[in-house]
Amino acid sequence: MADSYHHGNLRQALIDAGIKIINENGEENLSLRKVAAACDVSHAAPYAHFKDKEELIEAIKDNVTEKFMEKLIEAVEGKPTADAAIIAMGRAYVTFFSKNPDYFIFLFGKQNITAHLKMNREYKGDYPPFLLLRRMYLLHLEENGLAKTVEEQEIDLIKIWSIVHGMASIACMKGVKSSFNWNDIDERLLT
Amino acid sequence: MADSYHHGNLRQALIDAGIKIINENGEENLSLRKVAAACDVSHAAPYAHFKDKEELIEAIKDNVTEKFMEKLIEAVEGKPTADAAIIAMGRAYVTFFSKNPDYFIFLFGKQNITAHLKMNREYKGDYPPFLLLRRMYLLHLEENGLAKTVEEQEIDLIKIWSIVHGMASIACMKGVKSSFNWNDIDERLLT
DNA sequence: CGGCTATCTTTACATTGTCAAGTTCAAACA
DNA sequence: TGTTTGAACTTGACAATGTAAAGATAGCCG
């Protein structure tokens, strides 16, 4: 790695440094200048790679979302039924944020669930985790021979997502964590 | 009002100015100095009333929450059954934020649903809207002769809250608003 | 009336985002 | 091979912001 950025991969280095700062000191301590300093470059160097702070943060978000998606996909793989896959996804969802509460605040801090649900907008194309859930959900309908209108589907999806997201919120709280058990809600997720 | 603060109610004036700024320009444009300027006082004047920016924001939040509570209480009053009251609360919840999307971002921006659910912590005592919901929910159990453990109750409450909150998220989005109808979910709220 | 205290002002400073102008250096080109 | 060119980076500057310290002011209590 030596001095491999300077000319090389400063962009990724900035993202990594940003993630580290968020993990160690929370998002409120993230500043362009600190990120730059962490990479041993001048305070204006990031502007060669990002239009502004917002764009850096967006890049970090994408990066974290990728890590998130890995866990979700991992959870879904090899499950016998769509129902099992959805349950597993929910568990992975809660587990991921329960292990990285700072990511939760960071990802959904400003936009909230909204970020999740702005399906065809802003998040160029679609929010990957939501896409995955929808795919599993459609499979679930198919496997169980259910027919629903698109509106009904969206409502179901929102309902599932909201519950899981709400649980993740709680899982991120230190005190409540122990008194709450994901398994309690399994069977109520798909009704 | 004239020059009635200067010596009088600067504290409330700062809060009002803060709310106005948030409504007109969003939370990201809220600065201590702007709030002070809007009240025609020096930029350090707020420090006589608030420890720091965080405390001002917290005060504004409390103020907005009060307005929110008024609507919720209004919705609940005079309803024949607890079930009807809960449904009405949900509607009022969505309606309130759908009319004031900036409040949604402001109230739940950083803390998310978490803010709602940190029942006995941080929010000195209890979060009023959640208290109201719990009261209605307990009434609902009573009216329908249902017996549940405290854990089961909390799960139900979280579930209800998550769904409503998720819907409010969507209601705050400009594009999706029209395609979504609160009534669709009424009967699924209490199951 | 004199002083105390809360309220407000002034001044100062560090942090931060951003811009503009310069520098460097590696790769493309002549 | 020598030159050029453009991206990556540095330096220096500026305005906005949060906050601390010290002073002013004025209403109230003794």
Image (tube, coloured by chain):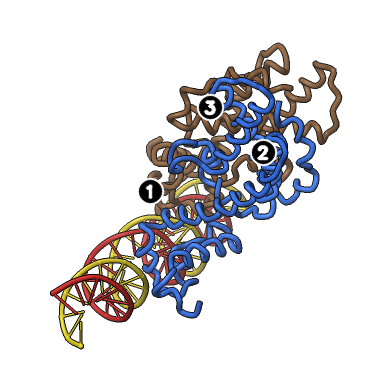
Chain colours: A blue, B brown, C red, D yellow
From the viewer's perspective, is A66 left or right of A179? Answer: left
Secondary structure of the residue carrying numbered label 1: helix
> Percent from the top left, x then y, of residue B146?
84, 21
Percent from the top left, x then y, of residue B87? 65, 19
Examine the rendering and report whether any part of residue B124 can be seen. Answer: no
Neighbour tally class for label 2: few under 14, some 14-19, many 20 plus, Cα within 10 Å: many
Contact (Cβ within 8 Å) of mark 1 with mark 3: no
From the viewer's perspective, tell me whether residue A179 is left or right of residue C23.
Answer: right
The chain holding disc 1 is B
Contact flag, marks 1 and 2 (Cβ < 8 Å):
no
From the viewer's perspective, is the residue at label 3 or at label 2 nearer? Answer: 2
Q: Which residue is mark 2?
A: A164
Task: Name the mark on residue B96.
Answer: 3
**CA separation, marks 1 and 3?**
29 Å
Comparing A86 with A14, the one in front is A86
Say what secondary structure mark 3 lies in.
helix
Q: Which mark is residue A116?
A: none
Alpha carbon distance from label 3 to label 2:
24 Å
- Amino acid residing under circle 3: Phe
- Circle 2 chain: A
* Image quadrant assignment for residue A4: bottom left
In which chain is the residue bearing label 3?
B
Marks 1 and 3: which is nearer the front? 3
Q: Are marks 1 and 3 on the same chain?
A: yes
Q: Which residue is mark 1?
A: B37
Q: Characterize the local packing of mark 1: few (<14), some (14-19) or many (20 or more) Cα atoms within 10 angstroms.
A: some
Q: Which marked residue is nearer to the observer: mark 1 or mark 2? A: 2
